[in-house]
Amino acid sequence: MSVRLRLSRIADFLHRNASTLLLALAVLLIWFATRERSVMACGDLKICKEHGLCAGSPPKCKANSAADCERSLECKRHGRCLLEGGRCVPDDSYCRRDPACKATGRCSVVLGPPDRCIATGDDCSASEICREKGLCAARDGECVASTPGCQAAPECAKQGLCVARDGKCVASAEACQASSMCKKQGYCTLTDDMCGIGPNDCERSERCSKFGLCRLREGTGVCEARSAAECAASVQCRQSGSCGLERSHCRPITDEHCRQSERCKTHGECGLHLGLCRPTTADHCARLPACSEHGRCSVKNGRCVASAAAECQASAGCASEGRCSVQGEACAAKTDADCRASKACREEGRCVAQLGRCRKPLTSTPTPASSTPAPSKTVPPSKTVPPSKTVPPSKTVPPSKTVP
């Protein structure tokens, strides 16, 4: 069958049944328009329980009552308990629970969306960043520097950052001169809103008087030593023997530097060892309290140590604590005999050597009476059962007579 013939027959069918087809189409349209629709409400969805958006139908769910917001998980978790513009929004308590409130002053809420926490003047003045950095005023929702806040912050006295400018604490010439970093390290000259080291600042600082670092190395901002005289005049020379100049620093160079120091008298550091003042002979250790009290009278690698039992036995620690034997490089109580001869044993009962010390002996814990098994009672011997009487043998019955 040709295509033209098929099309002709289809057209003929539609022409004859046009009214029927139109009626069927009308019925279908009426059914579709009037059918019962099954649409899930927002109150049945998860978004209602979590966010309080319980009114309407998807995708246009919204909050319609404060009760929906108060029942939501967002209310319990993030303080979104207030109804505003068809959604649940937070109050200031939401921001105040955030750690950023205490640290940076962001304690007040601003509704969006998005909702965000900002800083106000009162929030900033109560924050940690105000006390530590001087950022005590509010601008555009952030805490920024104020001059009173900068002056009250620790960095004003320490680094000279006492003036507020462009939201930050910066230094002034007067503040640099009064700062502790000027006194200790020579940061006394104002440079680009910060305190730096000027040409003569090193000489006026404690770095010069204590360590002999009295000259500024050009282009570096570092104080260094330039002469042995500066080193010899320093506190470090007097205390620890750093009286010679080496590579722009003060260090001990000879044994004489060490012998003249205070630590030679107090710590026996009277000889030069690996560039430092240390005990180098037994004589250096012998005059120290470490020898007389703890028996450390010999020298080893720049240290005073105990090397012989005689040194320990002659020490005060032997008589008082029983530390009369050498253990490693120190005196210790190694035997009970060491402890028994000590004052600690006689007066405190610490007469047993344990882990290098004299300790009290472990006392045995008495066994409670209830746990002691009671002695078993002696069971008397059972009475001997008398032997049963012998039953006499029964008489023999004579055989019955035979009946004829």
Image (spheres, rainbow, N blue to C red):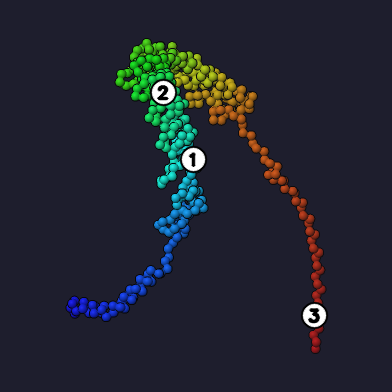
Residues tagged 3 and 2 counted as in contact (Cβ below 8 A): no
Amino acid bearing label 1:
Arg
Q: Residue at x 49, y 48 (%)?
A: 82
Quarter-of-image position of residue 373: top right
N-terminal label among 1 and 2: 1
Cα distance in 3D space between marks 1 and 2: 33 Å
Q: Residue at x 42, y 68 (%)?
A: 36
Name the one closer to the observer, 244 or 205. Answer: 205
Depicted 84 relative to depicted 12: above or below: above
Name the one closer to the observer, 150 or 269. Answer: 150
Cα distance in 3D space between marks 3 and 2: 149 Å
Cα distance in 3D space between marks 3 and 1: 128 Å
Q: Residue at x 43, y 56 (%)?
A: 61
Q: Which circle marks residue 96 in the picture? A: 1
Amino acid bearing label 2:
Gly
Q: Secondary structure at mark 2?
A: loop
Q: Position of residue 4 (x, y in %)?
A: 18, 77
Amino acid bearing label 3:
Pro
Q: Position of residue 11 (x, y in %)?
A: 23, 77
Depicted 62 relative to depicted 232: above or below: below
Quarter-of-image position of residue 7: bottom left
Name the one closer to the observer, 315 or 64. Answer: 64
Name the one closer to the observer, 225 or 55. Answer: 55
Q: Secondary structure at mark 3?
A: loop
Q: Which circle marks residue 328 in the picture? A: none
Q: Secondary structure at mark 1?
A: helix
Residue 10 lies left or right of residue 258; in this view the side is left
Q: Position of residue 327 (x, y in %)?
A: 50, 26
Q: Which circle marks residue 399 in the picture? A: 3
N-terminal label among 3 and 1: 1
Residue 278 lies left or right of residue 23; in this view the side is right
Residue to which mark 2 is pinned: 160
